[in-house]
Amino acid sequence: MTNAARARRPSHGPGSLLEVAVTEFNTRGYDATSMEDLSRAAGITKSSFYHHFAGKEALLRAALERAIDGLFTVLDSDGARTGSPLTRLRHIVRGQVEVLVAELPYVTLLLRVRGNTESERWALERRREFDGRIAALVREAVEAGEIRVGVEPALAARLLSGLVNSVVEWARPGPSTLPDDVARAAFEGILPAR
Amino acid sequence: MTNAARARRPSHGPGSLLEVAVTEFNTRGYDATSMEDLSRAAGITKSSFYHHFAGKEALLRAALERAIDGLFTVLDSDGARTGSPLTRLRHIVRGQVEVLVAELPYVTLLLRVRGNTESERWALERRREFDGRIAALVREAVEAGEIRVGVEPALAARLLSGLVNSVVEWARPGPSTLPDDVARAAFEGILPAR
């Protein structure tokens, strides 16, 4: 939405305020964004803003929770809990990319978090937990003999996370074949020889 | 090097000042770093600093040039210019990871650039040029029938760049098998089934 369009249709619910805030955080950086910036971008007064959110960090927290919740929902889905480790990993990678595309600005914010505030440290901790669960599953797949010999589980888990998360840099919202494409790249190679 | 060690052995050459500056830029963010911060971190006066560099952006430019030069040197190496497109790509990916590890803080800075200053826009333009040359080579490999059917060149080039660049998030300086490991992951899969 352009600034002009936003100015024409100011929206005042907590959901749309969160959306405005995440856009501003991603554009200016969280530290550089003031409540003045946020109320201006939302087209409402600062006091209306405070009616919905206690402050800037409450918005950050709500945005990070949305991204984290989406990702953990994938880990808790049926396909991530049944079947061989490799099947489960493939399901999770697809699901991660789906969440990443569906919640693009929220996951973008999550991936930029550095740990300067309590909410950021909380999010980093949750990300580590998420990555740890994937790493454990990678180890299981290697130990079950599902993976080609020579693959080091800790390195593979890091590269997998790097590949999947890199998608936020250029993905666009909307339906696509991206979840399958990224899964294929992860498990069969980005550039597999014929 | 710890702050204490740095305070004990202040080093005044342009090379070490650049190193100090890149560390500060990566830690605080370029916009948030002042010349005061830089001279304090280097353990010298501001005027000694200005003796070597015209200002903050000159340091940024020198640091970005170092990263960019390293990456383009890979593209211009023999192995990147001879052989089949797929062989050349494999050589480039290995070389990219080598540069990334050898010039870790410089490449980290490069990958965080957003385009707020002229030097940043210059670096973004050079990155686009680099990515464009990789993308062209991926297209050549697909057209030469070297790659498995169904791989979309533009997507593959983006994923390749994402995978390789993600290494800066956790790589440590020093010799390692990382260049080969990342190349294998890119061309055979991060988690190839047995």
Image: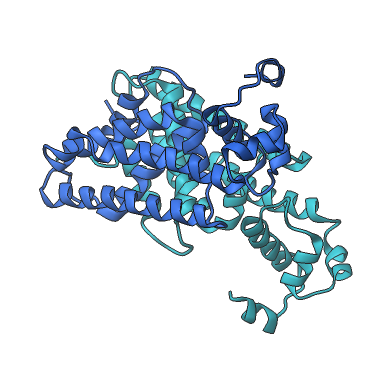
Chain colours: A cyan, B blue
- Expressed as whole percent of the image width and height from the top left, the position of residue A56 reads 79, 55
Q: In which quarter of the image is residue B191?
A: top left
Q: Position of residue B147 (x, y in %)?
A: 17, 44
The one of B193 and B59 positioned closer to us in this rendering: B59
Residue A82 visible, this angle: no
Q: Which residue lies furthest to the bottom in this view?
A: A8
Residue A143: % across, % down: 39, 17
Q: Which residue is drawn at 44% across and 54% down?
A: B122
Q: How many marks?
A: 0
Q: Is residue A3 left or right of residue B102?
A: right
* In this view, B67 is above or below A65: above
The quadrant of the rendering that contains the C terminus of chain B is top left
Q: Would you say A29 lies left or right of B143 here?
A: right
A73 left or right of A178 in image: right
As drawn, B176 above or below A42:
above
Q: Residue B164: name its quadrant.
A: top left
Q: Which of B38 and A67 is in front in this view?
A: B38
Residue at figure coordinates x 52%, y 29% from the top left: B15
What residue is rendered at 18% in x and 33% in y?
Answer: B79
Q: Residue at x 61, y 22 (%)?
A: B11
Image quarter in which the N terminus of chain B is found = top right
Front-most of residues A91 and B73: B73
Residue A85 can be seen, yes or no: yes
Q: In this view, does B186 lie above or below A171?
A: above
- Pinpoint residue A44: horizontal percent, then vertical percent: 80, 74
> Residue A14 lies in what quarter of the image?
bottom right
